[in-house]
């Protein structure tokens, strides 16, 4: 074995020991994918009008080399560079000569030095901003894959089961909190199955950010995700005071009218057209609601007074409808009696029951944040300041009664 041959083999043995991923393509040649160290994130402009996105990883550089006879004393190594963000012309005219200069300066084994130089100085010397404009999607896709690979190699403490697990079996939510996927699947499955839709969010108590829909679907599957969407829509409709219930007993779908003053309502499920006021089939704008169901009629139905009134109303409105209205009336009546007994006031805007536990009589609804007077129930939205003027106006029913019937008034007596 010649001295050159011996020196080449020693260098190749050292390289394969340092870089196990190095691929030998011949007795004295090989190739290696080299990751570039970025000194700072790069701003990329995605296709279209999307906002700039920062990336932290570049596609690797493919470095190929061949050690000819005479290397390293008299002959330079034959090298080739290739990367998705470099042009062949740049490599031939600029990057390869810069690397060969390392051999010119020493005439010693330089392959390790070249690899290290590419790793640490490749971005500064090779990167061209033009690639961020000509092929941004390639860089963005690679950055996303690299970030996921890094995530999968790391370990994280799941705050649900309190076990540390690899990222490969974990899920990072949009809020950056990480949990093991198995825990999240069980957690969200239980919430959706039991109907706790408002709790389908990050499990961290101080966070509370909603879960990205695509992540949620991947965690719980299509069937439960459809249930989640249906219940979400249902709860949104129930929270809206303008929401109506389809009068048809076979439907009972929730309906959100497009116009709160419109009398004609059409059920989105069964397409039944009815009058908002009398809840009967649509009779036109110029026909009076002759059979409007008033509280007095409901009481007469429940008491069947005069005799036969129940049968008459059932013939007009339907037995199932009248039975449901009767039950709702009794429940509402019992609730109103409970509210009066427990000193509970309803929000004038969304009708949410509000109990005053302490403080003055200026209240704020916990649901819609409407300020109102706890004594008279009047909304305080119309006041220029914070609503306290309501208790200072001489003509107000609550003049000088900001602390009436409160523990503050009791303590002052």
Image: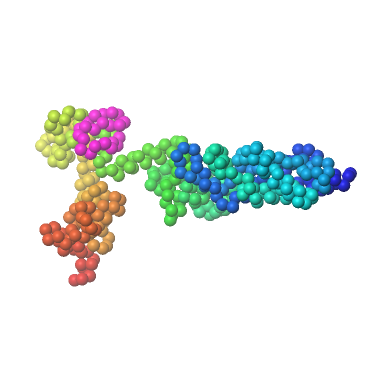
Residue most extreme to the front: 93
Q: Is residue 287 left or right of residue 105?
A: left
Residue at position x 13%, y 34% in the image = 309
Looking at the magenta stretch, what is its main secondary structure? Answer: loop
Q: Which residues are magenta?
A: 253-275
Apparent side of residue 228 relative to residue 253 in the rendered image (left or right): right
At horizontal 69% and vertical 50% (from top left) the residue drawn is 116
Instruction: Give residue 394's position: percent from left, percent from top.
Output: 12, 61
Residue 214 locus on image (x, y percent): 46, 40
Image coordinates for residue 252, horizontal then vertical, percent: 29, 34
Residue 173 appears in the rendering: yes
Which image quarter holds the C terminus? bottom left
Residue at position x 25%, y 43% in the image: 241
Total number of numbered discs in the rendering: 0
Is residue 166 a member of the stretch shown in magenta? no
Q: Position of residue 215 (x, y in %)?
A: 48, 42
């Amino acid at each position: 074995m010649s001295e050159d041959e011996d020196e080449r083999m020693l260098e190749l043995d050292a390289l394969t020991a340092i870089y196990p991923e190095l691929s030998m393509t011949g007795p004295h040649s090989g190739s290696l994918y080299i990751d570039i160290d970025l000194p700072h994130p790069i701003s990329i402009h995605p296709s279209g009008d999307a906002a700039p996105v920062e990336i932290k990883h570049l596609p690797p550089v493919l470095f190929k080399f061949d050690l000819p006879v005479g290397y390293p004393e008299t002959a330079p190594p034959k090298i080739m560079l290739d990367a998705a963000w470099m042009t062949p012309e740049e490599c031939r005219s600029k990057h390869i000569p810069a690397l060969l200069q390392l051999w010119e300066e020493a005439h010693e084994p330089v392959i390790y030095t070249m690899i290290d130089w590419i790793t640490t100085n490749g971005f500064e010397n090779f990167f061209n901003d033009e690639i961020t404009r000509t092929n941004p999607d390639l860089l963005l896709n690679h950055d996303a894959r690299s970030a996921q690979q890094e995530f999968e190699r790391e370990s994280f403490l799941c705050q649900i089961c309190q076990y540390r697990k690899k990222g490969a079996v974990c899920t990072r939510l949009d809020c950056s909190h990480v949990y093991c996927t198995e825990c999240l699947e069980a957690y969200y499955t239980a919430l959706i199955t039991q109907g706790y839709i408002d709790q389908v969010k990050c499990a961290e108590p101080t966070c509370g950010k909603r879960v990205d829909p695509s992540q949620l679907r991947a965690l719980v599957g299509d069937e439960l995700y459809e249930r989640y969407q249906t219940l979400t829509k249902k709860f949104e409709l129930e929270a809206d005071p303008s929401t109506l219930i389809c009068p048809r007993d076979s439907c009972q779908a929730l309906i959100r009218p497009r116009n709160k003053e419109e009398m004609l309502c059409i059920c989105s499920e069964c397409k039944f057209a009815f009058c908002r006021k009398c809840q009967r089939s649509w009779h036109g704008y110029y026909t009076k609601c002759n059979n409007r169901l008033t509280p007095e009629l409901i009481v007469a139905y429940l008491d069947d007074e005069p005799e036969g009134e129940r049968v008459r109303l059932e013939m007009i409105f339907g037995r199932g409808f009248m039975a449901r209205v009767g039950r709702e009336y009794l429940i509402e009546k019992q609730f109103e009696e409970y509210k009066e007994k427990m000193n509970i006031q309803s929000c004038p805007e969304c009708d949410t029951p509000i109990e005053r536990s302490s403080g003055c009589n200026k209240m704020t609804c916990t649901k819609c944040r409407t300020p109102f007077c706890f004594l008279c129930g009047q909304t305080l939205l119309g006041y220029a300041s914070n609503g306290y003027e309501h208790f200072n106006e001489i003509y107000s029913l609550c003049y000088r009664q900001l602390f009436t019937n409160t523990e503050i008034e009791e303590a002052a007596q």
